[in-house]
Amino acid sequence: MIDKQSPIPIYHQLEEQIKARIENGELLPGDLLPSEREYAEQLNISRMTVRQAITNLVNDRYLHRIKGKGTFITEKKFEQSLNGLTSFTEDMKSRGMEPSNKLINFEIIPAKLSLAEQLNIPEHTPVYEIKRVRLAEGIPMAFERTYISANLIKGVTDDIVKSSLYHYIESGLGLKLGRATQIFEATIANQEEIEFLEIPENSPVLFMKRLTKLENGSPFEVVKSSYRADRYKFMLDLER
Ligand code: GLP
């Protein structure tokens, strides 16, 4: 379906056709794209032209090349808005996805000095340390290490951390969440992240650190989250 008489360059026509096949689900994320030779023969166009179309789609991140294996359709990323203080559970539900948690570790530990300073509590005050893999539709999306001031947020249990912490704080304890400061960094997955996020070695991850305060200004949690860079992208509305 290439129109050689059209003023639209052939590589561009092919690009649009491949994009359309991705969008209508004929080509699925993770699928191997037919080879340059196959496209060239089928459409009776040169391999150079096919290569140009594919290179453009790789640059636009619709496709990606894996050395020695071929060109693949890139997974659709989950677009997460950063406007507003929301929980993982809310983020997933608002997209119609089913959130779940895999609890890796949950214990009470004495706060080290740097954590105590951030939470504005004396050193060695008890904090909950919670390590969770956060999943959507059963797929690991993020690995989170959460530190919560235990004297401020009382009564946290296994069942609570296996569902939603924010829901418990608001509905269970009747406390109001206020604001958070969050920083972002791009990093390469460490051993824990490779294991828990089920990603290959050397994968990129989006690392975030959040310090969250209650409405009355008391800091209550420090959270380190590692999101899969192949599944996530973030969106912000900027106003001038
Ligand atoms: C997000 C935030 C965390 C927060 C968590 C609460 O993942 N990055 O900082 O602790 O939501 O989620 P939930 O209420 O689902 O436990």
Image (cartoon, grey):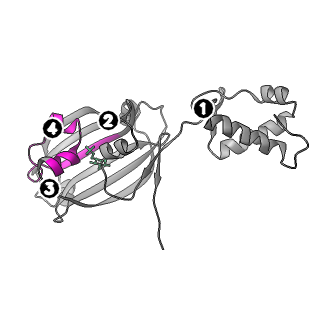
Q: Is mark 4 within 8 Å of ligand 1?
A: no
Tell me the crowding category of disc 2: few under 14, some 14 to 19, or many 20 or more residues within 10 angstroms, Cα based: many
Which quarter of the rendered picture does the N terminus lie within? top right
* Amino acid at circle 3: Leu
Relative to 191, say whether 174 is above or below. below
Position of residue 166 in the picture relative to residue 95 (left or right): left
* Amino acid at circle 4: Glu
Q: Are marks 2 and 4 in contact (CB under 8 Å)?
A: no
In space, the residues marked 4 and 3 are separated at their CA atoms by 22 Å
Tell me the crowding category of disc 1: few under 14, some 14 to 19, or many 20 or more residues within 10 angstroms, Cα based: few
From the image, tell me which residue sits under label 3: 175
- Circle count: 4
In space, the residues marked 3 and 1 are separated at their CA atoms by 45 Å
From the image, tell me which residue sits under label 2: 133
Badge 4 marks a residue whose secondary structure is strand
Q: Give the label, 1 or 2, closer to the camera.
A: 1
* Amino acid at circle 1: Gly
Q: Earlier in the sequence, mark 2 or mark 4?
A: 4
Q: Residue at x 66, y 42 (%)?
A: 58
Q: Earlier in the sequence, mark 1 or mark 2?
A: 1
User: Is residue 165 a member of the stretch shown in magenta?
Assistant: yes
From the image, tell me which residue sits under label 1: 25
User: Is residue 88 a member of the stretch shown in magenta?
Assistant: no
Q: Earlier in the sequence, mark 2 or mark 3?
A: 2
Q: Which mark is residue 107?
A: 4
Span colored in magenta = 143-171
In space, the residues marked 1 and 4 are separated at their CA atoms by 45 Å
Which quadrant holds residue 135? Answer: top left
